[in-house]
Image (cartoon, rainbow, N blue to C red):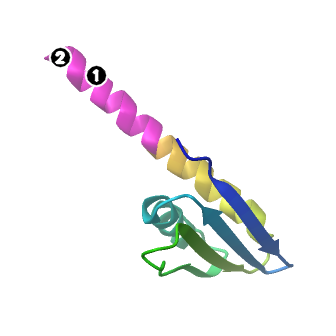
Amino acid sequence: MTVMRLGVKENEKELTVEMYNEDYSLAEILHHELLEEKNVTFAGVVPPHPLVSKQVIKLRTQRIAPSKVLLSSIERALEKVKTLRDMLKSEGERT
């Protein structure tokens, strides 16, 4: 298993996260959750080059630090995955 590496650049209103050794899926999940945040004025995923395993998420916020918004979005995504896992477990127990 390859270990994910991060590069983070943040200022007062903007955040850029570079995820290395990760595919497009995780970036898109986070992107979807970021778009649900009311203080986000921009959230995007830079289209990856097919030969480079680097995903870039860009985020701009108002009235709140972008890192706090990102962490909140990650927590929501985790809760959704846990709910899905629990539903699949209970469905498997019925059969």
Percent x, y for residue 69?
69, 64
**Residue 15 lies in quadrant:** bottom right
In the figure, 87 relative to 50: above or below? above
In the image, what residue type sits under mark 1?
Ser
Is residue 59 shown left or right of residue 53? right
Residue under pointer 1: 90
Density class for disc 1 (Cα within 10 Å; few <14, some 14-19, many ≥20) is few
Q: Give the range drawn in magenta.
A: 81-95
What secondary structure prevails in the magenta region?
helix
User: Is residue 36 visible from the viewing direction of this image?
Assistant: no
Query: Position of 76 compared to 87: left or right?
Result: right
Residue 49 in the image, given as x and y percentages of width and height = 47, 80
Horizontal side of residue 88 vs 44, given as left or right: left
Q: Which mark is residue 94?
A: 2
Mark 2: few/some/many CA within 10 Å (<14, 14-19, 20+): few
Q: Which residue is drawn at 77% across and 68% down?
A: 8
